[in-house]
Amino acid sequence: MTADTAADHWSALLGTALLGTDRRPLPPPAGPPAYRAAAAELAGPDHATALLEQAALATVRRRAGLLPLPAPTGAPVPAAPDPRPELPQAAARRLTVLLAGRGGGGPANLAELLPQWLVEARSRGYRPPAALVPGLLEAARARNEVRADAVALAGPLGRWLAERNPQWRFVLRTTAAESPTEADRIWQEGLFAERVTHLTRLRRRDPAAGLALLTGSWARERAEDRLLFLDALQEGLSLADEPFLEAALDDRSKNVRATAAELLAGLPGSALGRRMARRALAAVELAADGSRLLVTPPGEVTARMRRDGVAPDSPTGRGEQAWRLGEVLAATPLDTWTGTFGLTPAQLLALPVADAADGGALWREELHEAWARAAVRQRDTGWARVLLGPAPRDGRPVRGAGAPAKLLAVLPPAERAGWTAAFLRGHGLGDAFQLLGACATPWTPPLSTAVVAALERAAASGAYPWSHSGVLGLTERSLAPATAPAVAALAADAAPDTAWAETFDRLARTLRFRAAMLAELAGPAAPG
């Protein structure tokens, strides 16, 4: 039986399996008489079972016919030398525990702590012991979020192993940017996720080169791919990207057009921003006596407005006038208002808002909401700070316009943490989940103390721990390790064998684990 005949028979079996035996009959056995006789014995009234039996028989035949690979000649070329110092012994043992995913006396979910360990170890310039590199590559293969750090930590030995194991070939693609030839091959032939990653990294390093790369293949890309490639331009966005983004406003994909408009609206000095400013000033004016803002919502959406990202119909169920007003104002540079009216953001927000036609008290909420969206889009800390306002401490909801967590993310990390800590002193954990997610990790000591106090109040209120599972997950990864004694005290004070006692005990163990983990990486490195 020739190799071509065996391959044709295998393809026929696959075709029947894909289409189903009710739509395609079993292929007749092909091969030597003994093989055909064995296959005939497997035939029966149940065609599906017969198909599986034939496939099993064909698999045995295929494997039995494999020929050994040629024996390698000479000793393999060793991996390139790695000049980095080796991990301290305690840190290496900790990595073994993290890669195994279990360890006595430690936290229950070690997988959540591996990314933190990798970031810290990479930042300190260590190399792992050779015996742990395969485990690192396996972790990188299974988890995209740790891939970049794990591959960088694995270093030259990781690349050497990847050249010999097809399951680790992603390492070669991840490090392809080091070679212009390999980088070009990844862009032309790589998987979509690899191409997006390559473009994003290139934009961080050389925005002009990233734009040139994208421009060269833009016309050939699928619409869904163009959308994510366009999103990568947020890295290093500047007026040099404006001509490309202006052209993308005419793209055949609605989503691509909307993303291009979003990027241009956040780009200081863009022509789209100036066009939106003219529309906005036609819709909002300061009364002659300076006592209030008068609003005239935009009329029908014109073709030019549609090109600039204003959809003709509201997709949210809001009124059409409110929708058009919000879209125009959210894309308008915020310095339009301070420069034109000569007022600070705080003064503008304090002004009453009225309808220009009848003087009715309308549009205030829409105006402030649009300004909040603009502050987030333009990363304007001054406007975000005023829109957010002081953190309410008496249990009242946040009165600032827009989503508080999004506005909070615009502020510097220390200010974010301070605002959230003040908020927690008068609110429950459930109200602060999104705010905590916007804070940089690890949390500052004041914020960590406020979180521990909120956990204590939640336990005293009679609530169950699982009603705060989202926040508890954040605390394990983000709470300052120095709060471990305070959390251990909560565990000791809780009623024995209760859910809160178990929760506090686990959290205290996790914090101690993280503290030891970071201390080991800060210790002296072993001789290189």
Image (cartoon, helix red, strand yellow):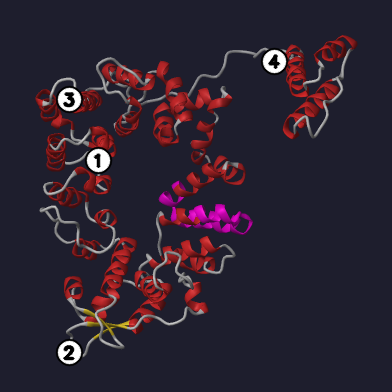
Residue indicated by mark 3: 501
Query: Going 46% across and 81% down the picture, which residue do you hit?
Result: 300
- Which is nearer the N-term, disc 2 or disc 1? 2
Q: Residues within 10 Å of mark 4 (few under 14, many from 20)?
A: few
Between discs 3 and 4, the one toward the N terminus: 4
Q: Is residue 240 above or below residue 281?
A: above
Q: Earlier in the sequence, mark 4 or mark 1?
A: 4
Query: Residue 217 magenta-drawn?
Result: yes
Between marks 3 and 4, how big is the CA–CA gap?
60 Å
**Quarter holding the C terminus?**
top left
- Residue density around tag 3, few if under 14, some if 14–19, many if 20 or more, within 10 Å: many
CA gap between label 4 and label 2 equals 89 Å
Task: Please give the range of residues in magenta.
Answer: 201-229
- Residue receiving disc 4: 69
Evaluate if marks 4 and 2 touch, with contact meaning CB atoms under 8 Å apart.
no
Q: Seen in the image, is 236 located left or right of residue 497?
A: right
Nearer-N-terminus badge (2/3) = 2
Which is more N-terminal, label 1 or label 3? 1
Label drawn at residue 441? 1
Residue 517 in picture, x, y percent from top left: 25, 25
Question: Of the residues under marks 4 and 2, which one precedes in the sequence?
Answer: 4
For the residues labelled 3 and 1, the Cα–Cα distance comes to 25 Å
Dot 1 amino acid type = Thr
Residue ranking furthest to the right: 33
Say which quarter of the image contains residue 122. Answer: top left
- Give the x, y percent position of residue 389: 17, 61
User: Badge 2 is on which residue?
Assistant: 289
Viewer-side residue, 44 vs 82:
44
- Given the image, on which type of amino acid does mark 3 rest? Ala
Q: Within 10 angstroms of label 2, few (less than 14), some, or many (20 or more) residues? A: few
